[in-house]
Amino acid sequence: MPASNRRNPGFLPVGGSEFGEHLLYEFSAEEVCRTKLIKQARHIRQRHLRTTNEHRYES
């Protein structure tokens, strides 16, 4: 398995390796995963804060 595919499974190099590497650096799978995780974590944290606040007011 080439390194490019291991870093980003959805990536298919088009044209020369130069062009392929360029695309890889712009949209590396790691970056995509990191942004997804950050958004997810932020959402979970907001939901968590909301529920803890509700419980605080109930008691």
Image (cartoon, rainbow, N blue to C red):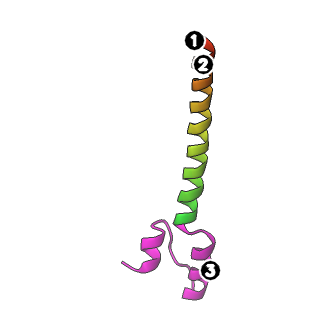
Task: Name the amino acid, label 3.
Answer: His
Residue 16 visible in the picture: no
Residue picked out by circle 3: 22
Residue at 56% across, 45% down: 41
Residue at 56% across, 38% down: 44
Task: Name the amino acid, label 1.
Answer: Ser
Task: Name the amino acid, label 2.
Answer: Arg
Question: Alpha-carbon distance for marks 1 and 3?
Answer: 56 Å
Residue picked out by circle 1: 59
Q: Quadrant of the C terminus?
A: top right
Q: Where residue 3 sits: x, y (%)?
A: 43, 79
Left or right of 5: which side holds 15? right
Q: Nearer the viewer, residue 40 or 6?
A: 40
Question: Alpha-carbon distance for marks 3 and 2?
Answer: 51 Å
Q: Nearer the viewer, mark 3 or mark 2?
A: 2
Residue at 60% across, 39% down: 43
Q: Where residue 46 sits: x, y (%)?
A: 62, 35
Residue at 61% across, 43% down: 42
- Mark 3: secondary structure: helix
Q: Given contact means CB atoms under 8 Å apart, are the residues at marks 1 and 2 in contact?
A: yes
Q: Nearer the viewer, residue 20 or 46?
A: 46
Quadrant location of residue 34? bottom right
Q: Quadrant of the N terminus?
A: bottom left
Ranked by sequence position, the earlier of labels 3 and 2 is 3
Residue 10 magenta? yes
Q: Nearer the viewer, residue 50 or 18?
A: 50
Q: Where residue 10 sits: x, y (%)?
A: 48, 65
Residue picked out by circle 2: 56
Find residue 29 and name its label: none
Q: Give the residues in magenta.
A: 1-29
Crowdedness near tag 2: few (<14), some (14–19) or many (≥20) residues, C-alpha within 10 Å? few
